[in-house]
Amino acid sequence: MTTSPAPPTGTAVPATTRPPVPDPAADERRVRPAGTSGAADRVFGAVARLSGTAVLVITGTVGLFLAVQAVPALREAGWGFVTTQAWDPGAGPFGIAAILFGTVMIGLVAIVIAIPFSIATALYISEYAPAGLKRTFISLVDLMAAVPSVVYGLWGVYFLQERAVGVAQWMSVYLGWIPIFEVPGRDPRDPLASLTDFKSSIFMAGMVVGMMITPIMTSIMREAFSQAPQGEREGAYALGATRWGMIRDVVLPFGRGAMIGGTMLGLGRALGETITVAMIISPVFQIQWTLLAKGGISVSSLIALQYGEAEGLSLSALFAAGLALFLMTMAVNFGASVVVNRSRSGAASEA
Amino acid sequence: MSVDVTRPGVPAQGPAPAAAARRTTVRPASAQVDPAPEPRRVLSSVRVSDVLALVGSALGGAALTWTVFTQLAPFSGRLGAVVVWYVCFLGLYALLVSFDESGQAVKDRIAGAVVHSFAAVLLLVLGFVVFYVVVRGVKALVHVNFFTQDLSVTGPLEPLTSGGVVHGIVGTLVEISIALVVVVPLGLTCAVFLTEFPGPYARVVRTVVEAMTALPSVIAGLFVFSLYVLILGFPRSGLAAALALGAMMLPIIVRAADVVLRLVPGSLKEASLALGASRWRTVWTVTLPTARSGLATAVILGTARGIGETSPVLLTAGFGASTNLDPREGPMVSLPLLAYELRRIPEDAMIARAFGAGTTLLLLVLVLFVVARTIGGRGPGVLSPRQQRRAAKRSADDAARLAAIAHARRRAEQDPILQPWERDSRLDLTEHDLAEHDDGPHGSDDNTP
């Protein structure tokens, strides 16, 4: 851009041919409207960078501060912390073997319940639902994903647990030959036996948590399914596929990454779920393979149930358990994000 | 419509004089139009036989289930009956469809039936969760004192006409407000940093933030408990709870805002930079306004997540029965914490209050969600009706102004009195005004100096 008045060379550049220039500085201003833009941009860049650093520090040091508090307990327990099945810090041995087992089992039960429902619902909303109702269903599922866990907990304790003891009993009678569905010390033929044996179990907690994570998983999967390319769908139809054939050969392969990633994110949620589990479970610090029988524990519910009386070493032990949970969820989430990002549909899927 | 094959003046093949002599039209037989109107095709994808197959197999399944449960096997229980019925229904449906369809179609129908039934069960159950909690909460909500009193003078045995959850509502609002005041500027600036300053450092920040999005909320509580209460030595308080909620919401909001900001079309930003705007002006006047609705949605949905979390508050706020307006000290309960703690007292009134607190929380989340859907849910650059009207008005104003300028220019060119250089400077002046984006029509150039 010319800033100095060039000699009139012809009519090609009209700006230079006019004799009276009203304000020579006007051109300057138009070229660079903000005279201080350099400084302002530097400040802007610095502020942005600073906020990024602040967020990085806040989110990145979570594990560090847990570890700082966990040191006394870990020093006291040593490697036994990972293998011990008891929780009596301060007075006796303590370790997270049974607690991690309960956490993982609750997560697995939740996932097993959530997978078929979330895949079917995601498919229904993206493929089967009438166009007019689609938005409503999407909003409904998103809303259910935002429902507070304490609400699910209230429902689980006062409704589901009362109703589902029958299911648990039925499973223990007819599927009791599978070890995990066995309820020890209970005669399945005794009709007068109390049903409370089936309450507060890992199965119950897993069921409520499964209901809770289903909307989140559904939302992630639906997002991916609905992005399956229209051309490939129509190609499948043009080759004579039925709707299910199209789904099986186009939509599901396209959304496979989101299905796996969404499931792992759901698992991460289930592992970390606190209040629902704490409301339902009755703490037992032993590895208990019988999922239907009363008792179990998870890391987060242990923290919620015991932090009140904890101080000194027992508080430090809770921090150590929290650190273990933190590492476990981070591993699961990291795996999920790797799977999602590698998949075809992963670029735009939201978690 | 049939077309005359031989037209006058256009000789067909063959000897021309002979063709002109014999003007016969030969039409193919198929061109004959049937005078009877063609029966209208049924476009509906639902056929009578499909419906009959569905209804029939449902009834057949019910009959089979009845037979199995009363005559054949020692089964009992409602849920068992439903499971057996469902299996029978699927089997019979497959059989009925296979009578007049191919194997592929049978698979299609069965898959459709399974997908529909699972989705229906899930949506019904999820709807029922809300319904159940609301119905049990209404018992407490109908009393006005539920929203005007706290539990400082109400014992566990008092009826629902006394006491309420106002301390929980106040606590929730105070805590979430403090958390938002801290998190929203920080989170949005960080999201802007991630999108506007890409590079290895931004990538590191983004990776860490994404990993933290699914941070268990109890861990966020422990984090603030460790840092704020144990290391810095402050008491458990509403402020600590707000910080814990903020630590939980921060990655969620950064992540969602980052996704929204990345969707802003690059051409808009480039246009702004090409006009000479500085970087931060581009962000402030182009990027952020374009993504406004998405950003609002991100913040509101993060708020909805934070408002319903119990465990961070449980670890950091402490539990009290009276209203506390000071976030710096003293226990400050929130609604979810209240619902959690109240139901531990095995009295009907307290459990009803717990459900009432849960319902209030649910309503709060619902309101937030509806607000988010109303202002958000639109892609970047997609305008609301009001914004559309405003944009249309601006555009009409521009058109009027341009027309006025063009009019003035024409008059100036036709004006014999003006000197050429005068004419030029006048034209330049109007263009200058145009560039300054002057509002209102710029007409009525006075031509007589």
Image (cartoon, helix red, strand yellow):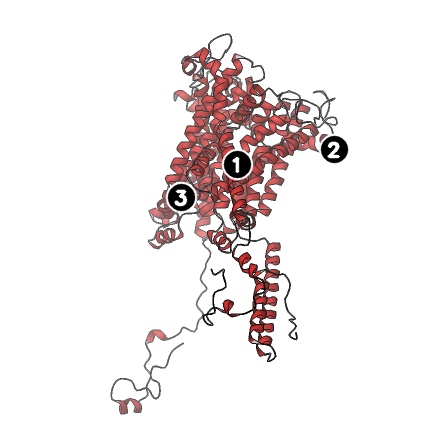
Pointers 1 and 2 within a single chain: no
In the image, residue B430 sits, relative to residue A69, either above or below, namely: below
State the residue in front, A5 or A138: A5
Q: Report how far apart the C-alphas of labels 3 and 1 lie in the structure.
A: 31 Å
Residue A45 in percent (x, y) is at: 51, 41
Disc 1 secondary structure class: helix
Image-quadrant location for residue B328: top right
Disc 3 residue type? Ser
Subunit ID for the residue under disc 1:
A
Q: Report how far apart the C-alphas of labels 1 and 2 lie in the structure.
A: 45 Å
Residue A255 in percent (x, y) is at: 39, 42
Q: Report how far apart the C-alphas of labels 2 and 3 lie in the structure.
A: 51 Å
Whether residue B64 is visible: no
How many numbered discs, if any? 3
State the residue in front, A108 or B173: B173
Residue at numbered disc 2: B144
Q: Nearer the viewer, mark 2 or mark 3?
A: 3
Disc 2 residue type? Val
Disc 3 secondary structure class: helix
Residue A211 in percent (x, y) is at: 50, 32
Residue at numbered disc 1: A51
Residue at numbered disc 3: A345
Residue A134 in percent (x, y) is at: 51, 47
Subunit ID for the residue under disc 3:
A
Q: Nearer the viewer, mark 1 or mark 2?
A: 1
Q: Which mark is residue B278?
A: none
